[in-house]
Image: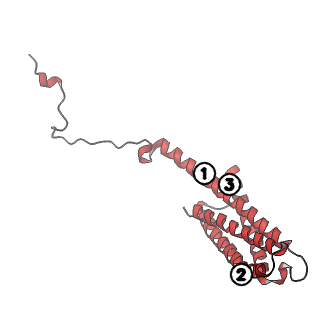
Amino acid sequence: MSNPEAAFPEDPAKSSSPVTEVPPTDGAAGLGVSGIVRRWRRDDLVRRGSLALRGLALIFCLLSFLIMATNRHGGWENFDKYEEFRYLLAIAILAIMYTGFQALRHFFQIAAGIHMFQHPTSSLVDFSGDQVMAYFLMSAASAAVPKTNFFREDVDNLFTDSLAASISMAFLAFFCLAFSALISGT
């Protein structure tokens, strides 16, 4: 007769040989095909989000520039008589040039795969440029707010409303570039 215990394998808990477990190689550990596909999708979403934020910043800067540049109503109601508003206009022009260049660069990078800079250099240019432009926009908008509030205490008209609208667009552009800097810093 044969041994009945030989037909059944030995219990691993009672075994003296160590049992090694093989770690999962699917998406659970971030390895394998599913992990790679997830990373590609995330990178694509980050690139498109960065392009969208730069596009919005460009639109807001352009609006800030146009509203301020057309704010001439004669007498004391000309923006170019006050250095705070000229500063906001100058920064809006710089921000338009920067965000326009960056938006075009990112568009060509996504659409055609054309890279102007190597990856580390591109990330550094994006991060530092976004931060510098965001701080310039915040500085210019913050410098224009006190003078606008002073004018609005005495009179509330089209001139002061246009000043407030231009400043608001500069603040919105600041937020877009600040979020873009956060994205490019990751």
Nearer to us: label 1 or label 3: 1
Mark before the other along the chain sequence, 1 or 3: 1
- Colour mode? secondary structure
Q: Amino acid at mark 2?
A: Pro
Residue at the image point whose x is 18% and y is 25% from the top = 8
- For label 3, the residue is 109
Residue 28 falls left or right of residue 70: left
Q: Is 1 above or below relative to 105?
A: above
Q: Which residue is mark 2?
A: 146
Q: Quadrant of the N terminus?
A: top left
Which amino acid lies under the numbered mark 1 shown in the image of this protein?
Answer: Leu
Asked if residue 115 can be seen in this view, the reply is no
SS label for mark 3: helix
The reply to whether the C-beta atoms of the residues labelled 2 and 1 are less than 8 Å apart is no
Q: Are marks 2 and 3 in contact (CB under 8 Å)?
A: no
Per the image, label 1 sits on a secondary structure element best described as helix
Residue most toward the right?
A: 74
Foreground: 12 or 65? 65
Neighbor class of circle 1 (other Cα within 10 Å; few <14, some 14-19, many 20+) is few
Q: Which residue is at a point 53% across and 49% down the rendered structure image?
A: 39
Q: Which amino acid type is shown beneath numbered disc 3? A: Gln
Point out residue 75 in the picture as x, y percentages from the top left corner: 90, 82
Please name whichever residue, 151 or 172, is drawn nearer the observer in this view of the structure. Answer: 151
Residue receiving disc 1:
45
- Give neighbour class at mark 2: few <14, some 14-19, many 20+ (Cα, 10 Å): few
- Residue in view at x 73 percent, y 58 percent: 104
Pointer 3: residues within 10 angstroms few (<14), some, or many (20+)? some
Using the rendered image of the protein, determine whether residue 44 is visible from the camera's viewpoint. Answer: yes
